Image (spheres, rainbow, N blue to C red):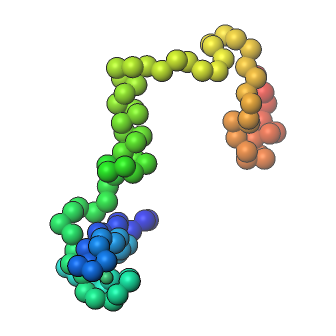
């Protein structure tokens, strides 16, 4: 289970992130650059938004609701020629094919 990222802010060096179990998070942590105690920024554990991959995915998903993209690839009913295997698990190669 990934640990949540907490943002701390060093007066000298600026913000930095620390990964801590929730039970061990405290109000201050040593700055990785200058070792001075840095205060925890008043932000919730990193849950997305702010340019993260999750935020971009969320925005892209929301956009498709009003602006569906062009369908790329084979249309339903057209012969399918996948450019890459659907699975790379070697056990799946022995499964019967339609
Ligand atoms: Zn510092």
Is 56 positioned to the left or the right of 15 in the image?
right
| Residue extending farthest top | 77
| Residue extending farthest bottom | 35
- When the figure is inspected, residue 50 is found, relative to residue 61, above or below; the finding is below
Determine if residue 23 is in view. no
Residue at point 42%, 40% (across, down): 57
Residue at point 37%, 39% (across, down): 58
Q: Where does residue 75 sit, x and y in percent of width and height?
A: 63, 13
| Residue extending farthest front | 12
Q: Where does residue 27 sit, x and y in percent of width and height?
A: 19, 79
Is 62 positioned to the left or the right of 77 in the image?
left
How many numbered discs?
Answer: 0
| Residue extending farthest right | 94
Q: Quadrant location of ligand 1?
A: bottom left
Q: Where does residue 47 sit, x and y in percent of width and height?
A: 32, 55
- When the figure is inspected, residue 84 is found, relative to residue 15, above or below; the finding is above
Q: Quadrant of residue 81?
A: top right
Residue at point 36%, 36% (across, down): 59
Q: Quadrant of residue 41?
A: bottom left
Determine if residue 86 is in view. yes
Q: Quadrant of residue 12?
A: bottom left
Residue at point 81%, 39% (across, down): 94
- Image quadrant occupied by the C terminus: top right
- Image quadrant occupied by the N terminus: bottom left
């Amino acid at each position: 289970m990934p640990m949540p990222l907490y943002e701390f802010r060093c007066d000298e060096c600026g913000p930095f992130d620390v990964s801590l179990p929730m039970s061990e998070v405290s109000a201050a942590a040593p700055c990785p650059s200058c070792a001075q105690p840095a205060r925890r920024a008043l932000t919730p554990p990193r849950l997305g938004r702010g340019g993260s991959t999750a935020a971009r995915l969320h925005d892209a998903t929301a956009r498709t609701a009003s602006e569906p993209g062009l369908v790329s690839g084979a249309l339903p009913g057209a012969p399918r020629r996948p450019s890459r295997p659907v699975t790379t698990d070697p056990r799946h190669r022995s499964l019967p094919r339609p």
